[in-house]
Image (cartoon, rainbow, N blue to C red):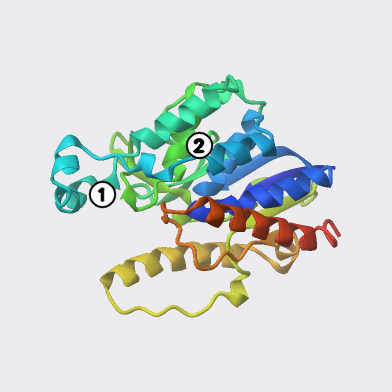
Amino acid sequence: MKIDGVFSGGGVKAFAYIGALEVLEEKEFSFVRVAGSSAGAIVSGMIAAGYTVKEMNQLFVDLDLNNFMDTSLLEKYVPIWKWFSLYFTMGLYKGDEFENWLYQVLAKKNVYTFHDLPKDSLRVVVADLTLGKIVVIPDDLERLYNIRPESFLVAKAIRMSASLPYFFRPEKMVNTHGGKSIVVDGAVLSNLPIWIFDQQTGRKRRPVLGLKLTASYDQIPAKKITNALDLTRDLIDTMRIAHDARYISTKHQEDILFLPVKDVHVADLELTKKDKDKLIAFGRMRASSFLKHWPS
């Protein structure tokens, strides 16, 4: 069955997607269009580029996430400097190694710009903090930044969407107002952008499946805030949860595969192979149960 898919953010929790995708493939589901925020943008980009689940499994399980912790030469030899520079750079790590990895991975499938993908097959969500907008790439590039969508690098779009605040340095883009926009992780404003594939007529072209790396909204536990770091983190979480919870109706919830990963932080780059395998197995288990009644 042909479906459209929307993937939420969730950092390294996204290994659970591999297990879910394995089950979807075994049940003969295939994606026509995909969209995502943050880690969901990474997975969506791989699917749109033509990666099989087996290839993605090999790619991610063998990946050393520590390779993405790139800093300047000064920060490398004076580690504490990166914490001082955080005030100006707005991110601990440059993100160049991450973007270069994405570029090389996509290049293996001859995908460089959005011109190399089937039309409308991929949408990546980012947050423009300067303009205060949820931005969909490639759809909004020309209107907001005077950039031709077909010339924009897919790796750049995904890296922008996965710019976890304070972790990776945000991207800066010149907007149509002539100013510089600060662009960060799309999950800040919409963690599960399932609204992207809504039709104005109210009729779907095909089933739309959302995959979300948390519990359903009414099952999210209360937070304990004891310091400024907790406040900042939970403020961001609340913003994205509030937007999606307001939008997603009961009808949409029936189309969402919730993957409530616990005991793994979004930026835990020290995951072992055993940890990754557990997340994949968890994704398989949840997907197998969900697909017994989906699509209804």
From the top left corner, tell me how far across and down residue 8 is, in percent. Answer: 57, 53
Q: Residue at x 41, y 53 (%)?
A: 270
Residue 101 vs residue 65, the one in the foreground? 65
Crowdedness near tag 1: few (<14), some (14–19) or many (≥20) residues, C-alpha within 10 Å: some
Q: Residue at x 62, y 41 (%)?
A: 57
Q: Earlier in the sequence, mark 1 or mark 2?
A: 1
Left or right of 112: which side holds 69?
left
Residue 123 vs residue 66, the one in the foreground? 66
Q: Secondary structure at mark 2?
A: loop
Answer whether residue 142 is visible to the viewer in this image.
no
Q: Residue at x 60, y 76 (%)?
A: 219
Label 1, label 2: how many angstroms apart (C-alpha)? 24 Å
Left or right of 286: which side holds 88?
left
Q: Quadrant of residue 231?
A: bottom left
Answer whether residue 170 is visible to the viewer in this image.
yes
The quadrant of the rendering that contains the C terminus is: bottom right
- Disc 1 vs disc 2: Cβ atoms closer than 8 Å? no
1 or 2: mark nearer the eye:
1
Above-or-below relation of 46 to 257:
above
Crowdedness near tag 2: few (<14), some (14–19) or many (≥20) residues, C-alpha within 10 Å: some
Residue underneath mark 2: 140
**Amino acid type at mark 1:** Met
Q: Residue at x 21, y 37 (%)?
A: 72
The quadrant of the rendering that contains the N terminus is: top right
Residue underneath mark 1: 90
